[in-house]
Amino acid sequence: MTQTHSADHDARPDAEELAAWADRAVARLREASAEARVVLDDPVVAARFGRLACASDFAIETLRRQPALLARLAADAAAPALPVPVLDAGNRDEWGARLRRHRAAESTRLIWRDVLGLDDVAATLAGATRLAEDCLRAALDALETEFASRHGVFRDSDGRMRRLVVFGLGKLGGGELNFSSDIDLVYGYDLDGVSDPQASDGERPLAAETWFARLGQQLARLLDEVTGEGFCHRVDLRLRPYGSAGRVAWSFSAMEQYFQHEGRDWERYAWQKARPVAGDIAAGERFLVALRPFIYRRYLDFGALDGLRTMKAAIAAEVARKELADDIKRGPGGIREIEFLVQALQLIRGGREPTLRGRELLPTLHALVESRQMDAGAAEALAGAYRFLRRLENRLQMLADAQTHALPDDALARARIATGLGYAGWAALRTELDRQRAVVGAEFAALLAPRRMQAAPDALALYWRALPEAGSADALAEAGFAETEEADGLLRDLARSPAVAALSDRARARLDRVLPALLQGAAEASHPMLALRRLLTMLHNILRRSAYLALLDEQPPALARLVEVVSQSALLAERLALHPLLLDELLDARVSGPLPGRQELFDACAGVPGGDDAETVLQALNEVRQALSFRIAMAFRDRRQGAEASARQLAWLADGVVARVLALAWHEVAGSHGEVPGARFAVLGYGSLGGEELGFGSDLDLVFLYDADPDAPSDGARPLEASRWFSRLAQKIVALLGAVTAAGRLFDVDVRLRPDGAQGLLVSSLASYSEYQRERAWTWEHQALVRARVVAGGAGLAEDFERVRTATLARARDPGGLADDVVRMRRRMRGELDRSDAALFDLKQGEGGLVDLEFLLQAVVLRHGLRIPVLLGPRHTPGLIDAARDGGVFDAETTAALHAAHAHLLDLGLSCTLDRRQRRAPRDTALDRARAAIREAARGQGLDFVS
């Protein structure tokens, strides 16, 4: 029947013909055994097997050979998984047959569940994967036992047996094996090079490489060899280092060396999905952790797209050569394009975002949406196409257990597949297939399409490529540079620099595309030479990292954003030059999205990797701080949020940093000296940190507090009394915050606001701190206490600190004496620190500036705190202004004026910091209005700060 229809391509079997064909298949099945005849006498059961026959000749043939399986399926339609066969020395001659019969039976069970609608495509793929793993593990366990009896086993220095690690790559590694797929395996072992033959336990010891290679070869043969029972699984070992020319089994150290020095782009894609599937699973996972830097770069890796383009071109050539246009895996819009698209996005961003390192495709699509790297609609369309194509792929292979991805020519086969998938006919199925492939093709083409900016003027491109010996600076003048001689000199220096000379051909081509675009962008800036100098400084630092050139070459928005940011902000230009990792932020979708809240910032710091290794933690924490503060700076620069919100977020970020450093410091001190039983510790933030008004690059005013018996010893091998233990802890915190890493330092720390200032102890007990505030602190120290808060440490001690602070601030005071103290201190500070002149006003220390506003609010709290408790809660300026209004100290007009003044002054100050200028601003109407509001409010409280 099949041969008749294959000859007649125009034949279109109708439903009746298909039903008759299925009936004949069931009849042949009935003839296989008496047991089958009894089972198939039930018309409902017979109809189910008719549907199975329509989907798979292989399944029917398996049931003819294994009638017990037919009875099992008929008895329980849900068809639970079959037990894995036992392979032992007693049935050595049957190992191959047992594995093959099990694979055929379990595969038939998967077809049965698919055809009856009991499994969706994901479950079928997972079932095929589980079947391959079961067979691999059973075969490996049996062979290892046999090898041990002949050649002994390998043990490490602790006497533990070392096993072969079988890595599954491709769809096996991803847990998405199709029905009749081969399995891509790589063999590894956790031993150095060649083992000592004397270390093995058997009578005929072998070197490690030989032992594991022979074991791997026998494993592949046991699974792959075709016998009268067919095969178990086709095994492909060509993805190992050097492919078929390489050794069969590799030590982990040798593989690491290979990938470090010779690993290629396609191998990064291949090892993305790698998973240990048999043998020493734990050792395999450890190796994959070590291999992660090869697969996933720490920066945005748009260079991965070049590797993908190369692979795509090779596949396209193969498709054209072999006429594979109707191949649903390799053809246009096929399964491989979806896989490559998702894997490319993983490679680009997975080094920075661990959630994007998944092995399974559909969960990874979801992760890409969650991280805002893919539109939800596009991801949903791709997921739908993937499910459709994988289900069709399975049905193509289920027909005859053939590893095919090509659409059949045979009319009957087409009708069987279309009907089995629920379509009215082949034409309807083909229409849907074409639609799904068009969706995939469009998304894949969009990923690989060149995304470069409109080409820079030919004159600039020609000028740059002629350097350093030729080229006319007239091109620079025509572009808009006034200081052409200086610009020309800088560019010639760059062109002859060793960094440019050392570029690969690919990287040089990228530079030749990127630099003219940067030149054009700089020429269009408000200060072209300033922009050019900053851009070239940054460029010098990224030439060694071709991935950054790739980012700018592949992503025009990033390049345009770079020119804009560098032109307008000296601070951000400096940070980009020093830390090119921040270039990633120019393209991160979250940079233009909602800013993180306090808990998100805290969690980002708490979650940095590295455990308790100080160097690793500080490096990662610096990178997190740099990225998040850059994101905040961009939001402020773009006017997506105001100065007050930005300053508060910077303070919250510092809170998270201090908390993480406290945990690290505590671990180090406790590791050396044990802990002080029952002791409590807190870090207090004073000044702009306490007031949640931190600037870009601000230092931290910290005070350290503990509560314990000062003489109580710690419980470690080298005990310290509590006072020395917590002094050591505070010193460690200060040192870690100021430690220099490749990603910069976290914060400079000022500890002079502690009791007795520079002459006092670095850390105070709660009792001594309370006594100092009560008996000896100056008025200005109580003023500083207004903005103080616990930024890290135990909640219990934080509550005790709040009680001390409240008792101190809510003290009865002489209004006249208080005013005199506050005014005297303010005038003294201004005399020493005010940098105002006739043209520029000192935003912080000038008369009517931010410090005047701080002193005003501190005086209000100290004067009215006893009578108006609401004043004792807030630390930040806006909150204090509102509390003064709520307590009747300020009227509505004064409140509004002070809010506006604070926002304006803070905005000007942060803008100066962002451009690396002193916090001074030209005098204008808006500034005069802000100063007047602060001056009038201060005088209304009896405070005249003008000397």
Image (cartoon, rainbow, N blue to C red):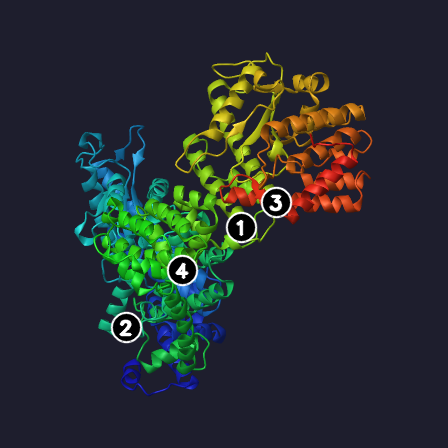
- Image location of residue 686, percent across then percent down: 62, 30
Q: Residue at x 49, y 65 (%)?
A: 380
Q: Amino acid at mark 1?
A: Arg
- Residue at the spot of label 2: 324
Residue 495 placement, left or right of 64:
left
> Which comes sooner in the sequence, label 1 or label 3?
1
Query: For mark 1, does the 10 Å Cα neighbourhood hold few (<14), some (14 to 19), or many (20 or more) residues?
Result: some
Q: Secondary structure at mark 2?
A: loop
Query: For mark 4, does the 10 Å Cα neighbourhood hold few (<14), some (14 to 19), or many (20 or more) residues?
Result: some
* Image height of 471 relative to 438, above or below: above
- Image location of residue 662, percent across then percent down: 53, 29
> Which labelled disc corresponds to residue 923?
3
- Image location of residue 627, percent across then percent down: 47, 44
Q: Amino acid at mark 4?
A: Pro
- Label 4 and label 2: CA atoms lie apart by 35 Å
Mark 1 in CB contact with mark 2 (< 8 angstroms): no
Q: Amino acid at mark 3?
A: Arg
Residue 539 placement, left or right of 887:
left
In the image shown, does 864 or 218 lie closer to the viewer? 864
> Which comes sooner in the sequence, label 4 or label 1?
4
